[in-house]
Image: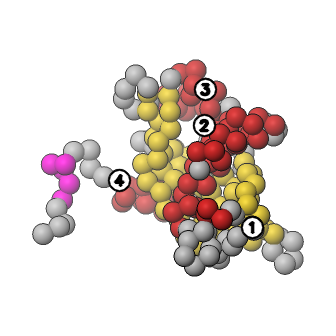
Amino acid sequence: MFFRTLLHVLFLSRRKHDLGHYEIARTNFITLPTDLDINRHMNNGVYFSIMDVARFDMLVRNGVWRIMREKGWYPVVASETITFRKSLNLWQRFTIESRILGFDEKAVYVEQRFVRPGADGVPEVFAQGFIRGRFLRKSGGIVPVPELIEAFGTVEGEGLPEWIERWGADVALPATRAEAPSVWH
């Protein structure tokens, strides 16, 4: 995955057209033999890794990567979820559509869809994932959302869907171990 990331960030992403911060980034891939599991389709864990590569492609193309480097920030995933509809098989070409959905008081949300052309030519969604991310400072600490909005601008549209705000709150771990309820006996 490291080489796929380098290939996209250093070469392929820079050859594509620039995007606005909130435009959809489309990143093309092919299912490789190293992506397969015992059932000969893409391993469920590989989806998350390829989503990372596509997010870096988006960040390079929409200018966020440059802003992050200038400010000494870096992105981390706080939570992620994925839903599968169809399998991706060896040598199948697919596109990941990535877009920034918006912010809440603590995090940035990104939607990513694995798509292939359907029989009728209309793109068909094979899997869909959502990422809740934070930005950290290389010097230490979290970049507050108001500072992110100042650097990147506000999201156009109605804001985050209510269900994704609920998901973000439901999956967030407490700040300290003492605050965490023990469900293990």
Q: Residue 168 in magenta?
A: no
Tell whether label 2 touches label 3 (CB within 8 Å).
Answer: no
Cα gap from disc 3 to disc 2, whole angstroms:
15 Å
| Residue 181 in sight in this render | yes
Residue situated furthest left in the rendering: 185
- Which residue is depicted at the point 43% across and 60% down? 167
Quadrant location of the C terminus in the rendered image? bottom left
- Which residue is depicted at the point 81% across and 74% down? 118
- Which residue is depicted at the point 19% across and 66% down? 183
Sequence-wise, the earlier of marks 3 and 1 is: 3
Residue 67's tag is 3
Helix, strand or loop at label 4? It is: loop
Sequence-wise, the earlier of marks 3 and 2 is: 3
Q: Is residue 100 above or below residue 31?
A: above
Residue 91's tag is 1
Residue 142 spot, x, y in % from top left? 39, 32
